[in-house]
Amino acid sequence: MNSVAPLPDLSRLCVHTITTKPWPIETSAAKFAAAGVKGITVWRDTLAGRDIAKTGQLLRDHGLAVVSLCRGGFFPATSAEQRAKALDDNRRAIDEAHALGAPHVVLVCGAVPGQSLVESRKQIVDGIAALLPQCAAAGVKLAIEPLHPMYADNRSAVNTLAQANDMVEALRSPQVGVAADVYHLWWDPALESEIARCGRLNALLAFHVCDWRTPTIDLLNDRGLMGEGCIPLRQIRAWVEAAGFRGFNEVEIFSHRFWAMDQDAFLGQIVSAYRQHV
């Protein structure tokens, strides 16, 4: 397929709080709204010491949709005690999402160095399954985010969209879906077909955008602004929209380079790059 999505306006632009990490959430809310951003994904660290329900209302008062809460996950461990602690943290994340008014929690699923990926994936499925009754009661979904294979040692044993879709099929719950991040998935030759599969499963809950720099200086904290790298952003957006996705395009950038600059100027660059390249 060679179709390319039309240029977006800002009505589906969401920015993650981690993208403008130096700002507290109150500043992010005001600045995002003033720049024309329409959605915000909240990272849990920004909620520390705050009344979460009031913070959610503050975001909505600024005209921002609360798109998701990041992050839960990190289910695998070598001991039952560690796995139980992980479940407790995920239960807190579900409660936080409910209080905030976020429809889903994004899961970075975890992995254990030295433990087989097969076992880690089993523990991930088991962990998600254990949370489903609480999710149903709270009206909160869980979005499995596949991470690039370079993170398979200790951050996530879910490394392709196919693996995430397999988990969705195995769990058979309307409370479980997928978060697709171009940084982690752009290289996958099966990406178009697996995005289409997401559509058939009605499983695509979130779509994250940034770019892949060459060379990449830091594999975690050197993501590019859209248009700085090699990811075919418009083509991938066309695929997710062909699969029926009508949610936000979420700008999620971890970057020491951008965190060090004036954040007002950076936000202006985000809006401009979004218009030009997403």
Image: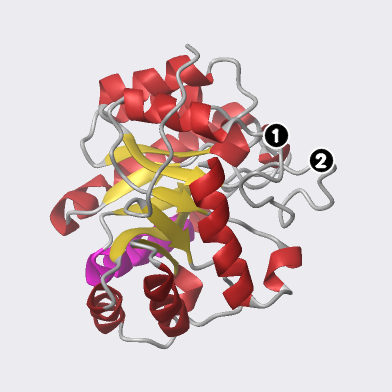
> At 32% across and 24% down in the image, what residue appears?
243
Tag 1 and tag 2, C-beta contact below 8 Å: yes
Residue 262 image offset from top left, x and y in percent:
67, 78
Q: Position of residue 270 (x, y in %)?
A: 56, 59
Residue receiving disc 2: 214
Provide the residue designation for mark 1: 230
- Image coordinates of residue 28 in percent, x first then y, are 46, 76
For the residue labelled by badge 1, is the local secondary structure a helix, a strand or a loop?
A: loop
Q: Is residue 98 magenta?
A: yes
Instruction: Describe residue 273's horizontal placement relative to residue 255 as left or right.
Output: left
- Which residue is pictured at 64% across the width and 36% down the height? 148
**Above or below, 242 relative to 207:** above
Q: Nearer the viewer, residue 66 or 167?
A: 66
Q: Residues within 10 Å of mark 2 (few under 14, many from 20)?
A: few
User: For this rendering, which residue is in front, 101 or 58?
Assistant: 58
Q: Earlier in the sequence, mark 1 or mark 2?
A: 2
Q: Amino acid at mark 2?
A: Thr
Is residue 64 toward the left or the right of residue 268 in the image? left
Vertical arrangement, residue 105 with respect to residue 181, above or below = below
Question: Who's the residue at 65% across and 44% down the image?
Answer: 227
Q: Amino acid at mark 1?
A: Cys
Q: Which residues are magenta?
A: 84-101
Say which mark, if any, is on residue 171: none
- Residue at 65% across / 31% down in the picture? 116
Is residue 36 part of the magenta span, yes or no?
Answer: no
- Whether residue 158 is visible, yes or no, is no
